[in-house]
Amino acid sequence: MVSSGQLAPATDAAPAPTPTGIQTLTLGDLGADPAWRRPVLIGSDHLVLVTGGHGTLEVDFRPFPCRPGTMFRIRPGQAVRRTDALDAVMVRWSPYALHGLDVDPDAVPTHTQLVGEDEEAVINEVSQLVVDCRRHRGAAGESLLRHQLAVLLLRLTLTTVPAGGTEPRTFRRLCREVEHHYRYTRRVEDYADRLGCSVRTLTRACLAMTGRSAKQVIDERVALQARRLLAATDEPIARIGRYLGFPEPTNFGRFFSREVGLSPGAFRATGGRVAVPARIVRPRPPHWTDRA
């Protein structure tokens, strides 16, 4: 338990990283429980490259089919659970690792199946990172690893073409604001004020990108965080509700039941292994869940 008003931070189980925060590990290093009965909250940025096996990897309660060459970009705070015997190499880094380098890790697709020359190039670069994380330490090795990571992220960025136009840009701006403020306000008007646009503009952008209103997008982000904390931690339900901006447990319970279709207690009892209503499984903001 942590001090009042704070929830236990997300953590990853693994050996200590290099001074850059760059580390290579395996999927099994993430969870102390080999059965993966509950998801693991990820505490730092990761790339996950599936190298063997066929099955699924669950990210934020959504199962994704996996085979060799499947790549994930996992962000801090996401909930991950392996549901099959998959082998994967992971690259983990801290924000410092990319300081001063011209690369945007948020431009990397969150879920993609690599094929052909892209797959070969990424496998080679990940393999070299694995070797160099083991062999090279100190200042010179730190610089090498940072630039190798930047090249890998840039290469992955080139495997997808981001949507252009006004509405995608507005939607991405809203996602960033919601990510920072969802605990404090769920009012579309507050986000419109922060972004200097109208509620209608935000709603139009959200409908174009997700088929849902701006209010639904905001509420879904809150519900997603509630699901993460209920399934992956032992924090009391009332405390989770307060953390997410619900002073009264009954208000949190009503909100969660409306969004997810189960009470918080019932959802926790399933370990997060429950079918989610169709409206929550529609395309989602790229910063919150994986996209195909």
Image (tube, grey):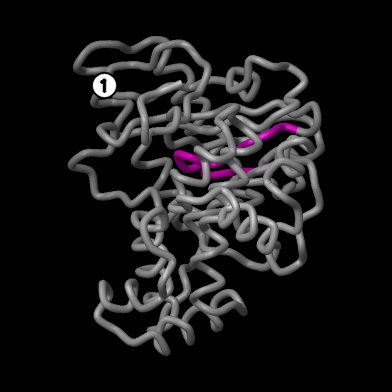
Name the chief secondary structure element in magenta.
strand
Q: Position of residue 254 (x, y in %)?
A: 64, 59
Q: Read off the magenta span.
A: 70-82
Q: Nearer the viewer, residue 149 or 215?
A: 215
Residue drawn at (52%, 41%), measured in percent from left and top? 240
Q: Is residue 53 left or right of residue 129?
A: right
Q: Position of residue 29 (x, y in %)?
A: 59, 18
Q: Is residue 62 left or right of residue 107?
A: right
Is 72 part of what is drawn in magenta?
A: yes
Residue drawn at (81%, 52%), measured in percent from left and top? 275
Q: How many marks?
A: 1
Looking at the rendered structure, the kind of residue marked 1 is: Glu
Q: Nearer the viewer, residue 134 or 266?
A: 266
Residue drawn at (46%, 68%), measured in percent from left and top? 162
- Res. 287 visible in picture: yes
Q: Is residue 98 left or right of residue 27?
A: left
Q: Nearer the viewer, residue 17 or 118?
A: 17
- The image quarter in which residue 149 lies: top left
Q: Position of residue 45 (x, y in %)?
A: 43, 37
Q: Position of residue 167 (x, y in %)?
A: 43, 82
Is 131 part of what is drawn in magenta?
A: no
